[in-house]
Image (cartoon, rainbow, N blue to C red):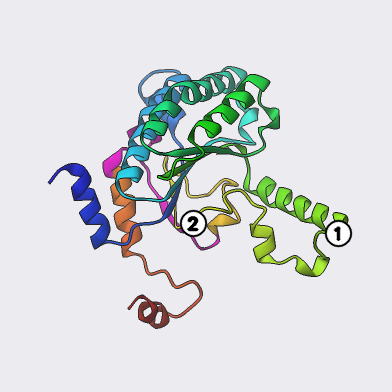
Amino acid sequence: MDSNEDLAQQAEDKNIPQHVAIIMDGNGRWAQLQGKGRVAGHKAGVESVRAVVSHARKSNIKALTLFAFSSENWQRPAKEVSVLMDLFMYVLTKEVKRLHKHNIRFQVIGDLSRFSDKLQKNIAKSEKLTEDNTGLVLSVAANYGGRWDIADAAKKLASDVKSGTISVDDINEHSLHQHTCLAELPALDLLIRTGGDYRISNFLLWQAAYAELYFTDVLWPDFNESQFEQAIDCFDQRERRFGKTGEQARNEET
């Protein structure tokens, strides 16, 4: 039995999250520990992205969302921001072809208006290339913030009310959710943060309401398929109650 078959068998034996999100933290600290500049850490982190995308695909996870660049990251040193943009361009021009080969659908979520015209065009081109793929959905959050996501959804609802498409009474959790990023994907099951900090840093605030949270001290460039599998194993051991009692939740599972 090859590794892909092994993973498929493991998926049948455990509760695999359908949608996983990762806050990829620790690139700068990893580089400093190596005696290198922060930029080297971001470049090393690309290998970890490849590893988790590969593992998610082989594990039959439906959606993987990666926090690449927050709306607050513009405050970082200009050189670091420039390198991050260059890496983004590299991923769009090189890695997306590999994603397409593996039937992965790629999309970018966030306020893209602040990016250069060239970058916006490359994003659109990459999304167009993979839009009909039916495998893993890989979402990259760039210039994204959870508060922005909710505010943007509220703005769209307000516009609908103003145009007469809906009434104020039609606004509820479901209608707001339909205007948030990732609304078409399975509910977020597992949110992973690497790097040792215990916060979600304005990432997927709406979507994470009932997600299981997993924090690890491992710095992002050291986060590999084995580390990812540990997070999935931990998820498998959690009892997800969604407001019910443990007994109710267990009875529903059976």
Residue 173 lies, with reference to residue 196, above or below; the image says: below
Determine the residue positioned at 87% across, 55% down. Answer: 162
Left or right relative to 79: residue 234: left
Q: Residue 21, how many percent across, how many down?
A: 46, 47
Q: Is residue 143 magenta?
A: no
Determine the residue positioned at 86% across, 59% down. Answer: 164
Which residues lie in the magenta part?
209-226
Q: Which mark is residue 186?
A: 2
Q: Disc 1 residue type?
A: Gly
Quarter-wise, where is residue 104 in the image? Answer: top left
Quarter-wise, where is residue 54 in the image? Answer: top left
Left or right relative to 103: residue 83: right
Q: Which residue is mark 1?
A: 164
Q: Is residue 222 magenta?
A: yes
Say which element carries label 2.
Answer: loop
Foreground mark, 2 or 1, reads 1
Q: Nearer the viewer, residue 136 or 234?
A: 136
Residue 138 lies, with reference to residue 83, above or below; the image says: below
- Graded by Cα atoms within 10 Å as few (under 14), some (14 to 19) or many (20 or more), the crowding at tag 2 reads some
Q: Disc 2 residue type?
A: Pro
Say which element carries label 1.
Answer: loop
Quadrant of the rendering where the C terminus is positioned: bottom left
Would you say residue 223 is visible in this rendering?
no
Determine the residue positioned at 76% across, 51% down. Answer: 156
Residue 38 lies, with reference to residue 129, above or below; the image says: above
